[in-house]
Image (spheres, rainbow, N blue to C red):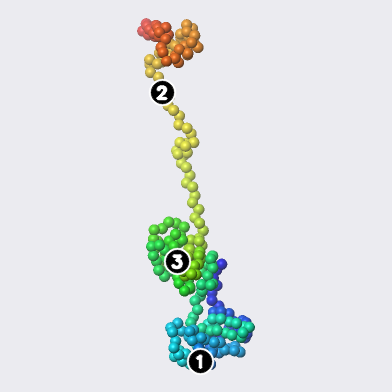
Amino acid sequence: MEANDVATPENAEINDLSDVKRKMKFTGTIVKTTLAGALVDIGLEMPGVIHISQLQKEPVNRVEDVVEVGQEVEVWVRRVEPRRDRLELTMIEPLPLEWRELEKGMVVKGKITRIEKFGVFVEIGTERPGLVHISEITHEYIKDPKQEVQEGDEVEVKILEVNRRKKQIKLSMKALEDKPVFEEKPVSKKKQSKTSEPEEQEEEIPTAMELALREAMGKTQSDVDESELETKTKSPGVDPELDQILSRTLEHKVKTASE
């Protein structure tokens, strides 16, 4: 919901009291003064009434100290009651936004009047400025509000919360911005190959002794039963007979190679 500007047409073509709205501005003439206030002619069949408390912001002791009969004044509609033919006026310019007009979700424009470490204060036309917390200035992380805004900047804000009892207004600037979309960084080929493919274990290179022993064991398969050899090699002890066979075979292999 967006706040509407105050409708204040000066002496618009209004012929009936039912067409008069709050905060409308008129130029009128004082036609009578009393102890309680003054009567003002704004061009309607009946004059409007200004209470003594609405002549100016400062306290008034006597009506004649502020206005006199025949004086031209600027007034605003404070309250209108067509059924009672009553029109209350004020010479104190009303605020663009009053507490009862503020609603959660309303979008308003304002000016930054003060900057603190925890946020910024924005004048939006109410009795008190609203606060934009540092976390509500932008979607990005900032350490200081001055990284994004400066005093005097005109900004558009969204009302997050209104506490009429404490006279507090919480505002947000980032609520009117699109949330940034963070794209995932593509995984490099090197990292992808490391993560997707299991590392191959390097096969240990056998020594010359091990190669000779393997060959000797292969040639003695006719003398030693393969199943018996597998069973014996897995046993914790060493068979003396098998050890002798392997030794003779290895000596024969070495002798043949030297010849």
Report the front residue among 259 and 119. 119
Which residue in the protein does label 2 denote? 204
Residue 140 image offset from top left, x and y in percent: 44, 56
Cα–Cα span, label 1 and label 3: 43 Å
Residue 246, percent from left and from top: 41, 9
Residue at image position (61%, 89%) is 45
Seen in the image, is 118 located left or right of residue 26? left
First reached walking from the N terminus: tag 3 or tag 2: 3
Residues 127 and 197: in front is: 127
Q: Amino acid at mark 2?
A: Glu
Q: Position of residue 111 (x, y in %)?
A: 45, 70
Mark 3, residue position: 131
Task: Find numbered disc 3 in the image and state the secondary structure of the residue it sits on.
Answer: strand
Q: For mark 2, does the 10 Å Cα neighbourhood hold few (<14), some (14 to 19), or many (20 or more) residues?
A: few
Q: CA distance from mark 1 to mark 2?
A: 114 Å
Indicate the quadrant where residue 3 lies.
Answer: bottom right
Please tell me whether mark 1 sits on a helix, a strand or a loop: loop
Quarter in which the C terminus is drawn: top left
Image quadrant where one finds the N terminus: bottom right
Q: Residue at x 38, y 62 (%)?
A: 117
- Residue 177 sits above or below residue 186 on the image: below
Q: Which residue is mark 1?
A: 34
